[in-house]
Image (cartoon, rainbow, N blue to C red):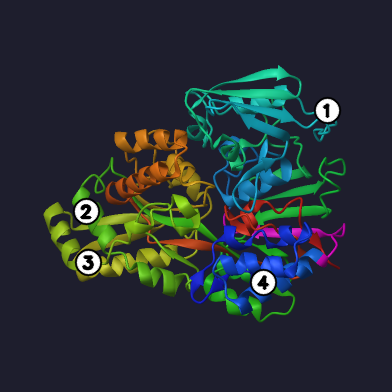
């Protein structure tokens, strides 16, 4: 079965249907569930089919045992088990196997308890208190304490921090220990989104004083048995895990198969049971194979073509705008992605972000005449873009842009670079290159981590003082209408002025064996936000 949700040619947003299983578990009737889905815009027949699937899932009982081999699309020498340094989905999966967050992001993108049993803010959202669980032990048997949390959170603070996500907690002044199981975050400015931020990939809690992450201990559902960056990792079940009898699988082996065809063949042959980043063109092949299924979740993820604004040729605004005008957005969506996604407008926030998305902004239209005028005015006649197949369709998208530029007499050279190690050797460094982004829980987080002037992952090195001011203002604004106006202005600034081209937003499309069950559907990364480790189980 394909879990990609589409109704009458339009994607149904994740937050509109992902609560059906939870509602049924809490005692909702079939009629209640049908009302939830039809209110979200789903047709009666479609809603009935989805409810039937949810009922089967609820009826199934998790079983213990089994070994799973999981292959992702990229890996390399920069693979890490240090949460603050994680850069791609294979890192996110491994650290989710190993650690926990203070807060957990649910399928509707709200923040709930994890290591923090409860949390609350003061009336101005300038101080947050987190009360820790008292039944959590590290893999070495020692108890989780406030010292571990303070150490972990402080790794994101200060100018010398190496954290890839430190910009998300730039408003945190300090962390304070009240007692052995209570910590407080003191902020310089209001931030109602802090618990959501602390539920994202980089904010895992590590043990106080940990400096060597080759074989770290964690509080997570699995212990690290082996870790060889660029090769593989092995994770064995933590039988003393704190969460309600989980996990269920005995062992995971995680590694990369960078060739898309080889990765599919490994699944077809039974060599692996989970594979990430399924090429949409291979969907029919997987669906036609007994014992296999596609697992796809609508999302706001996106792939990028990047021109650094601090280097030639990206430092010429006419050239960058010409590239944006030559994107065949509809073809990227319909031909390359096979309709799995939404049109983009050269900024990272799409329909999946709900009320944060500026729906009246529209989409920049294909305009080769204006592009030709801008290219001629720029005086630039050729350029090179470094490209690796680090996300499905990126190479095809570059080839499409190359053909459009060639029609105007412009020579865009594609420099193919290795996929292995791309994120450490080429991304953020080359004058023109490609990127790939997972969705974040809120628009503010996505724009902060990717476009704020001082963000480490600011791909095009775009700097805009007004944009930075709006980010801070929107975090502190509780009036939804005012926050929406700010979001719209930020999205327009980004679309018109940054050096990042975003033609579409994508669904996550993965594949697995059909008897591997229990996957959550958090739309923030492949395989349900990489939240699967403690939930999935094999139905023998």
Residue placed most toward the observer, 122 or 365? 122
Give the Cα separation between the discs numbered 4 and 3: 41 Å
Side of 218 where 140 appears, left or right: right
Nearer to us of marks 1 and 3 is: 3
Nearer to us of marks 1 and 4 is: 4
Nearer to us of marks 3 and 2 is: 3
Residue drawn at x 48%, y 60% as measured from the top left: 389
Side of 450 where 88 appears, left or right: right
Side of 367 where 387 appears, left or right: right
* N-terminal-most mark, 1 or 4: 4
Residue 370 shows in this picture: yes
Res. 489 image quadrant: top left
* N-terminal-most mark, 3 or 2: 2
* N-terminal-most mark, 1 or 2: 1
Residue placed most toward the observer, 239 or 311? 239
Task: Report the span colored magenta.
Answer: 59-74
* N-terminal-most mark, 1 or 3: 1
Per the image, the residue denoted by label 1 is 142
Q: Decide: few, some or many residues near mark 1? Use Cα within 10 Å; few <14, some 14-19, many ≥20.
A: few
Does the magenta portion include 350? no
Residue 431 shows in this picture: no
Per the image, the residue denoted by label 4 is 50
Give the Cα separation between the discs numbered 1 and 2: 58 Å
Give the Cα separation between the discs numbered 1 and 3: 63 Å
Residue drawn at x 35%, y 33% as measured from the top left: 469
Residue 180 percent coordinates (x, y): 76, 20
* Circles 1 and 4 in contact, beta carbons < 8 Å: no
Residue 306 percent coordinates (x, y): 35, 51
At numbered mark 1, what does the secondary structure look like: helix, strand or loop? loop
Per the image, the residue denoted by label 2 is 319
Residue drawn at x 76%, y 50% as measured from the top left: 534
* N-terminal-most mark, 2 or 4: 4
């Amino acid at each position: 079965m394909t879990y990609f949700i589409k109704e009458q040619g339009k994607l149904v947003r994740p937050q509109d249907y992902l609560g059906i299983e939870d509602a049924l578990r809490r005692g909702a009737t079939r009629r209640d569930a049908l009302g939830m889905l039809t209110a979200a815009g789903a047709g009666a027949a479609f809603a009935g089919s989805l409810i039937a699937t949810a009922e089967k899932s609820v009826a199934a009982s998790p079983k213990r045992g089994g070994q799973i081999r999981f292959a992702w699309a990229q890996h390399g020498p920069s693979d890490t088990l240090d949460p603050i340094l994680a850069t791609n989905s294979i890192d996110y999966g491994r650290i989710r196997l190993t650690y926990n967050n203070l807060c957990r992001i649910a399928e509707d993108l709200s923040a709930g308890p994890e290591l923090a049993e409860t949390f609350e803010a003061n009336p101005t959202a300038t101080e947050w208190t987190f009360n820790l669980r008292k039944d959590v032990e590290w893999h070495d048997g020692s108890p989780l304490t406030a010292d571990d949390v303070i150490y972990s959170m402080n790794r994101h603070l200060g100018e010398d921090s190496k954290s890839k996500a430190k910009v998300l907690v730039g408003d945190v002044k300090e962390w304070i220990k009240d007692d052995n199981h209570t910590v407080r975050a003191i902020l310089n400015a209001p931030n109602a989104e802090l618990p959501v931020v602390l539920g994202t990939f980089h904010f895992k809690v590590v043990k106080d004083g940990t400096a060597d992450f080759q074989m770290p201990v964690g509080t997570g559902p699995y212990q690290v048995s082996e870790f060889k960056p660029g090769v593989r990792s092995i994770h064995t079940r933590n039988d003393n895990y704190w969460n309600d009898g989980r996990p269920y699988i005995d062992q995971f082996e995680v590694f990369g198969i960078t060739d898309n065809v080889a990765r599919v063949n490994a699944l077809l042959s039974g060599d692996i049971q989970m594979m990430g980043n399924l090429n949409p063109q291979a969907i029919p092949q997987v669906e036609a194979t007994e014992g296999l299924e596609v697992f796809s979740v609508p999302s706001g993820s996106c792939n990028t073509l990047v021109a650094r604004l601090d280097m030639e040729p990206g430092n010429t605004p006419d050239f960058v705008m010409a590239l944006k005008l030559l994107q065949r957005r509809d073809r990227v969506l319909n031909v390359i992605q096979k309709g799995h996604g939404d049109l983009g407008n050269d900024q990272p926030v799409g329909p999946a972000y709900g009320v944060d998305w500026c729906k009246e902004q529209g989409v920049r239209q294909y305009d080769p005449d204006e592009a030709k005028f801008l290219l001629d005015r720029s005086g630039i006649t050729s350029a090179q873009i470094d490209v690796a197949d680090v996300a499905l369709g990126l190479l095809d998208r570059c080839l499409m842009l190359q053909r459009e530029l060639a029609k105007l007499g412009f020579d865009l050279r594609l420099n193919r670079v290795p996929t292995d190690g791309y994120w450490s050797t080429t991304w953020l460094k080359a004058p023109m290159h490609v990127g790939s982004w997972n969705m974040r829980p809120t628009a503010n987080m996505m724009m902060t981590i990717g476009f704020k002037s001082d963000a480490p992952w600011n791909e095009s090195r775009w700097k805009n003082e007004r944009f930075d001011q709006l980010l801070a203002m929107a975090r502190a604004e509780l009036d939804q209408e005012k926050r929406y106006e700010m979001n719209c202005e930020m999205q327009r600034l980004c679309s018109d002025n940054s050096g990042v081209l975003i033609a579409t937003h994508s669904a996550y499309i993965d594949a697995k064996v059909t008897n591997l069950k229990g996957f959550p559907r958090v739309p923030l990364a492949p395989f349900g936000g990489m939240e699967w480790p403690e939930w999935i189980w094999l139905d023998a």
